[in-house]
Image (spheres, rainbow, N blue to C red):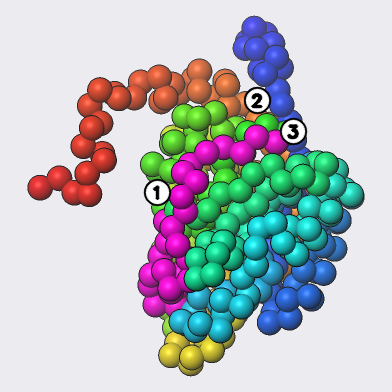
Amino acid sequence: MYYDKMLYNMTEKKIKVGLVQQHNSGDRADNMNRLKQRIEQCAAQGAQLVVLQELHNSLYFCQTESTDNFDLAEPIPGPSTEFFGRLAGDLHIVLVTSLFERRAPGLYHNTAVVFDTDGSMAGKYRKMHIPDDPAYYEKFYFTPGDLGFEPIQTSLGKLGVLVCWDQWYPEAARLLAMKGAELLIYPTAIGWESSDTPEEQKRQQDAWIISQRGHAVANGLPVIAVNRVGHEPDPSQQTRGIQFWGHSFVCGPQGEILAAAPSDNEWCQVVEVDLGRSENVRRWWPFLRDRRIDAYDNILRRFID
């Protein structure tokens, strides 16, 4: 028992993580100012890493297809990277943001940008899996990412950053784990269609949580998921809008919930995460060691028939 405890202490690497779950409006300046206040609040509580929700500067505009919404996009670097980079540098934190990137005329991405403690851009990730469902018409707006699944090196360690729809794909999480990511991060915008029954709402939310906790267990890594919250109407009035279900959470490498937000309110919380604990969990449950990589060739096929 003493020896086990000694090994654990040798591998401790604790960091404080801030999560910001926000209800957005159509006022971009107000959204960004409220984010700034909450990021500062997290830093004041000792956060070293702060994670924001997907497309946090605006309403979730993908409920409809409108070419006018492309005006929301901006270059990287650009005004938002200047704003959030300065904030990260002033507060000496690592900051994970999520932006609508205008890469070139007619070419747009859903892009996570990570800033290091000096305010510099540590790296970016362009969302790879793009949904096209009722009220989530993202294929109209976003070109699939072309940067692959690469951890982003920061002063706190290697961050495995993915975005929303990526959360359903174990392959993405596994590739980041295999490349040395020390935790998995999912900025997200997901919710219920307002006419869904309570039973269906629970099934959907449970599936979302279970899927990401499964990535934590399968890879022996902590997971951070940050979602938006509140109702956003459908501008086309074809649906009753989306009720974003919040419930941002942090779980450890065995899927254990360390903190979870409510489903109906904004939330700003600082949580301690021990990155070093992954070492012991992987020793106890050596899933990575026991993978039969010689037998997985067919995983690259669309379907086996």
Instruction: Identify which residue, 98 or 262, lies in the foreground.
Output: 98
In the rendered view, would you say 283 is above or below 14? Answer: above
Q: Disc 2 marks which amino acid?
A: Gly
In the rendered view, would you say 186 is above or below 288? Answer: below
The numbered mark, 1 or 3, whose residue comes first in the sequence reads 3
Q: Can residue 141 be found in the magenta stretch?
A: yes
Relative horizontal placement of residue 7, taking residue 233 as reference (left or right): right
User: In the rendering, which numbered label is found on residue 155?
Assistant: 3
Q: Residues within 10 Å of mark 1 (few under 14, many from 20)?
A: few
Q: CA distance from mark 2 to mark 1?
A: 25 Å
Q: Give the labeled residue for mark 1.
A: 169
Q: Is residue 234 visible?
A: yes
User: In the rendering, which numbered label is found on residue 208?
Assistant: none
Q: Which element type, helix, strand or loop, lies under badge 2?
A: loop
Query: In the current view of this chain or complex, which residue is farthest to the left?
Result: 305
Residue 130 at x, y percent in the picture: 42, 61
Q: Which element type, helix, strand or loop, lies under badge 3?
A: loop
| Quadrant hosting residue 229 | bottom right
Q: Can residue 259 be found in the magenta stretch?
A: no
User: In the rendering, which numbered label is found on residue 276?
Assistant: 2
Q: Disc 3 marks which amino acid?
A: Ser
Q: Disc 1 marks which amino acid?
A: Tyr
